[in-house]
Amino acid sequence: MRDAIEAEAARWALRHPLSPDERVALEAWLAAHPRHAGALLRAQAALSSIDRAISPEPAGSAEEEETAATPRSRRWVLAGAGSIAAAAAVTAVIGLRGASADHVATGPGEIRRMPLADGSIAAIDAESELRIALAKDARRIDLARGQVWFQVAKDRQRPFIVDAGIAKVQAVGTAFSVKRTRDGVRIAVTEGRVAIWASDASGAVSILDAGEFAAFRADGTAPVTGNAPSAIERSLAWREGQIALEGETLEEAVAAFNRYNQQQLVVRDPALGRERLVGLFQLNNPVGFARTLEATLDADVTVTPNEIGLSRNKNAAR
C-alpha cells in the first residue's frame, strides 16, 4: 500500500498547474488517507532534489555553501526511502495539457537534425520514432524506438523529460542521447548532467555527468553505468553521417552500414566477419568501405546494384 501511495503522490506532484477539477480531485485524495499529505510533500521534495542535482545554484549561494559543508554522493542523489519510490515513479502525467504533440519518424538511412520550438536541437537517427510535446510547464519527449541526441536549451521552469519506456531522463541545459531497442535503453551524456531512473520505480534516481552512460535492460535488471567519453563520441558519429570504428568486428560494422543503405553489405566468410577494424568511414558510401577492406584485409569484393559481397581472397597467402 505504501508504494502505491508514494507512486500516486509522484503523479500528483507532476500535475502542475492544476485545472479546477483536478484541484477538487487532489483535495479529495488528500482527505482520503492521513498519509497522503506527507507522501505528496516527499514527492515534491524528491523532484526538487533532482532539479538541484542537475542544475546547481550559482556559485556563492547559501545552498552551495551548505552542500560544500555536507558532501553529497555524486551519483546516487536519492536512495532507500519513501521519497525514492515517489521520485522514481515520475512516469505518468507530466502536465502537458494544452500542448500539441508532434509525431516524428525517420526511415532507413534517414538522419534528421531538427530545431525545437524551445531552442533545443534534436538529431534523430535512422529508423526512429518519437513524439514531442512542449508546454508552458514541461517539455516531454516520448521515444518509441530508435535513437535521438538532444542539445537541450536551459529552462529550469520547464523540465525536459525523455520517456523511453523502461527508463526516463530529465535534463536542464545539457546534451545527451537516448537509444531504445527491443533489448533495452542506453543513455549517454555528452555535455552537462542528467537524472535517470527506471520507469517501474524499482530503483533510485541516478545522476550521469558528461562522458558517462547507463544501460537499462528489458529484463528489469539493475542498469549498468560507466565512464566512456571516447566510446560515446564514436557511437554518435552518425550525427555527421559517419561510422567510427575502434576495434569493432567487420560483422558489427556491416550491421551499422546496412541500417543506412539500400545496397547491403554481405559477409560470406565468418572468419572475415570476425576481423576487427579501426577507421572513420562515410555511412552513405558502403562501396568505398568495401574497397578499403579489399586493400587492407585482401578481401574479395563483388558489387551488384543491391548487394556488396565480402569474402576471403582465395589467392591470399595463408
Image (cartoon, grey):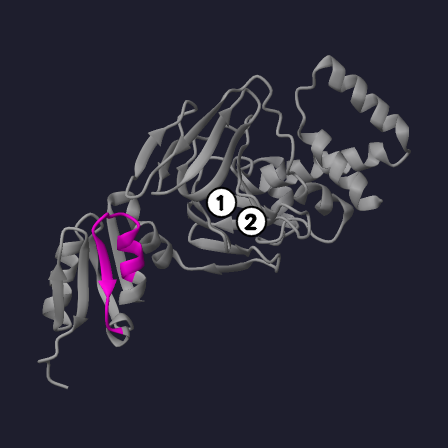
Magenta segment: does it hold 293? Answer: no
Q: Position of residue 99 (x, y in %)?
A: 53, 19
Amino acid on which disc 1 is placed? Arg
- Res. 12 image quadrant: top right
Amino acid on which disc 2 is placed? Ile
Which is nearer the eye, 92 or 27? 92
Determine which of the numbered discs, if any, sits on residue 104 in the image.
Answer: none
Q: Position of residue 304 (x, y in %)?
A: 13, 55
> Residue at position x 85%, y 28% from top?
30
- Res. 3 image quadrant: top right
The reply, left or right, for residue 69 in relation to residue 105 is right
Q: Please give the residue where the numbered disc 1 appears in the rendered image.
A: 193
From the viewer's perspective, is residue 234 above or below residue 240?
A: below
Magenta segment: does it hold 263? Answer: yes
Magenta residues, start to end: 253-269
Q: Secondary structure at mark 1?
A: strand
Q: Position of residue 314 (x, y in %)?
A: 12, 79
Q: Please give the residue where the numbered disc 2 appears in the rendered image.
A: 207
Crowdedness of circle 2 by 10 Å Cα count: few (<14), some, many (20+)? Answer: many
